[in-house]
Amino acid sequence: MLTIISKILEVLGLTSNVVAILSALFELLGELAVVITLFKLFSRLGCGLMWRQIQVIGDSDAFNKLETVLLDTGLFREKNITHVDLDNIEKVDEAKLAIVNYGSIDDDKLRKILERLPSRAELIVYCDPKDGKLNQEMMSLLSDKSHVVLTNFRGRLANDILTSLMVLSYDRRNK
């Protein structure tokens, strides 16, 4: 069948025109696929940055320090960053993205946070080297939980937040 069509096109002198048209069409479809993929990626990240609530869990000093780091990046709005005091850990049930300053909490509170954290939520544990190291038991506990990131540097913290926003799906109803 294909040979018949190609012979007809050859007789009419349209072979090179059809090949050129099909080549241009496939090139256009390929470029369109790339544009759609990039649009999805950037819209997902944009929605994450614009609407996602970030909970910072810890004392007031830890919150102020981490909030300053987040706002200094210019990527996050102040109204999207909320403080969860150590006395209100039950608010972690609502979290989609939570940051814990390890230097401001003890291991028991971190265990409670891990227990209460929703399965689709991301937890970033910021452990400043000045505040000491995590013990091996706590490292194992963090390692066993999905969607947990451990970071030691403030610059790395912003990168881990951006990665978390891209990886986790965004549902506007569940800001």
Image: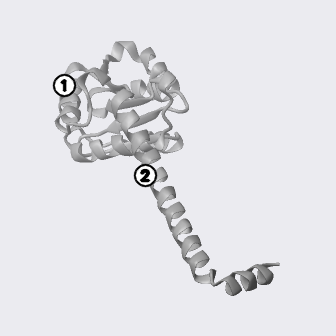
- Tag 2: residue type? Leu
Closer to the eye: label 1 or 2: 2
Neighbourhood count class around disc 2 (C-alpha, 10 Å): few under 14, some 14–19, many 20 upward: few
Residue displayed at 48% across by 30% down: 114
Specify the label residue 1 is tagged with: none
Residue 107 position within the rendered picture, expressed as x and y whole percent measured from the top left:
39, 30
Residue 138 position within the rendered picture, expressed as x and y whole percent measured from the top left:
43, 39
- Tag 1: residue type? Asn
Q: Secondary structure at mark 1?
A: helix
Q: Spatial distance from mark 1 to mark 2, Cα to Cα?
A: 35 Å
Out of 88 and 21, give the one closest to the viewer: 21
Q: Is residue 31 above or below residue 24?
A: above
Q: Secondary structure at mark 2?
A: helix
Q: Which residue is mark 1?
A: 64
Does the image show residue 139? no
- Left or right side of 39 for 26: right
Residue 136 position within the rendered picture, expressed as x and y whole percent measured from the top left:
42, 45
Specify the label residue 38 is tagged with: 2
Out of 22 and 104, give the one closest to the viewer: 22
The quadrant of the picture occupied by the N terminus is bottom right
Residue 89 position within the rendered picture, expressed as x and y whole percent measured from the top left:
41, 17
- Image quarter for residue 53? top left
Neighbourhood count class around disc 1 (C-alpha, 10 Å): few under 14, some 14–19, many 20 upward: some
Does the image show residue 155? yes
Q: Is residue 74 above or below residue 105?
A: below
